[in-house]
Image (tube, helix red, strand yellow):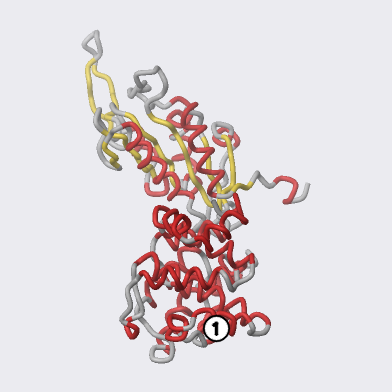
Amino acid sequence: MSAEQVKINTVNLTTAKKMLETFYNSRESLMLWGKPSTAKSSIIKDFAIAKAKELGLEYSEEFFGAKYFTLKVITLSQMDSPDLRGMPCVSVDNNGKEITKFIPTEELPREGQGILFFDELNNGDETTLKAAYQIILDGKYGSLQRIKDSTGKDAFWRVAASNTEDDFCNTTPMPLALLRRFSHVEVMPTTEEVVNYFISMSEDARVIAYLQAYTADLFPTEWTDVLLTKKANPFPSQWQRISRLINGLKEGQDNSLIREIVTSCIGQGLAGKFMAFIKITNKIDWTKIYTDTEKEVKNLQATAGTDKTSLTYSLLSELTMRWKNNVSIKVMKKDIKLVDKIIVDVISNVDKEMQISFLKMLKQANAQRFIKLVTMNKEISNVAAELGKIVL
């Protein structure tokens, strides 16, 4: 049987989040698989924070109790099986005879409600994995009994996340006895989901534009042992690291430093491609964009080949971040309201695919302000209405 035939179902982050809600409501255990930097742990944490808010409870990753919704992260790779069972102590039974009892670990709850999150589950050794069987299946361990909420459901939902066996993360094969305790899905974010997240986090516009122009570079193109030799490989977390390291560094003035930083994060090949990309985007004359937007955008659209795509994505990404962060071009000394007019002119002079991308980016950057922008500007309103559900 081929690897393709046995591959588990893969979903994007949007679908994965919906699945978390469904499995939580039923308190059925779910295991998220995925390659490094696919946001498996992040979406579970975001889900727990949102659930705490929904229930009117205080979110915690440390404390258990009636006022908390606790996300307890249990990392088996950092534990031995006795860590779960607890430390032994001498006690006396009902007949006065000495017996051995175990004091359960503080990692496991005695009260409250929340989520027991087994992160990097298949990085634990075999004996530690076996020690977790009862917790995962029954929600109890040793002398610690299952905790119920006011509806009679398990107070603590069990969920896990792990890297896949073929991604060179030194995983431990999981026995069928443990696998059957979960439902399984692989998580792989789309480039649009990653870009939207980067926009929400106000990451560097150059990185956002590059990933929109070269979507295949978000992850390694081949998963072989060459990744271990190269050391530096592209992942969403690495692109975010690049964004934060080069923030404030300028092309031309800091090119050598930018190149070395990018190379250290994603390797020489992609670093050269990224530097070539931002060199192309330097052709954007921001003074002209602010003084004669329509003419300058038309000039950019007349650029041949891939340069047109690179320049357009760079323009849209930079404008989105300026619009989101209320940053105007200093040399013009204009009010930020000018950016709204520029957005109208840009949308009117790019093709439909870019219109869709731009409006989606603006909506992601600031949904409330986006609605106002669409409402107050007839041109944008007409474009948004034409594109319909794709954007709105």
In depth, the one of 389 and 45 nearer the eye is 389
Mark 1: amino acid: Lys
Residue drawn 48% across the image and 72% down it: 207
Q: How many numbered discs sit on the rendered protein?
A: 1
Residue drawn 35% across the image and 75% down it: 328
Tell me: 231 left or right of 148. Answer: right
Evaluate whether residue 373 shows in this view.
yes
- Could you say where residue 218 lies in the image, as x and y percent from the top left? 56, 66
Evaluate whether residue 227 shows in this view.
no
- Could you say where residue 332 lies in the image, as x and y percent from the top left? 34, 83
Q: Is residue 103 above or below residue 35?
A: above
Q: Is residue 187 above or below residue 223?
A: above
Q: Quadrant of residue 211?
A: bottom right
Toward the top, the furthest residue is 95
In depth, the one of 70 and 169 nearer the eye is 70
Residue annotated with mark 1:
295
- Could you say where residue 258 lies in the image, as x and y percent from the top left? 42, 83
Q: Is residue 230 above or below residue 286?
A: above
- Could you say where residue 210 lies in the image, as x and y percent from the top left? 54, 73
In depth, the one of 240 and 162 nearer the eye is 240
Toward the front, the furthest residue is 378
Q: SS for tag 1? A: helix
Q: Is residue 117 above or below residue 259?
A: above
Residue drawn 35% across the image and 21% down it: 149
Tell me: 68 left or right of 255. Answer: left
Tell me: 86 left or right of 345. Answer: left
**Badge 1 density bin: few <14, some 14–19, many ≥20, Cα 10 Å:** some
Residue drawn 63% across the image and 47% down it: 10
Q: Quadrant of residue 192?
A: bottom right
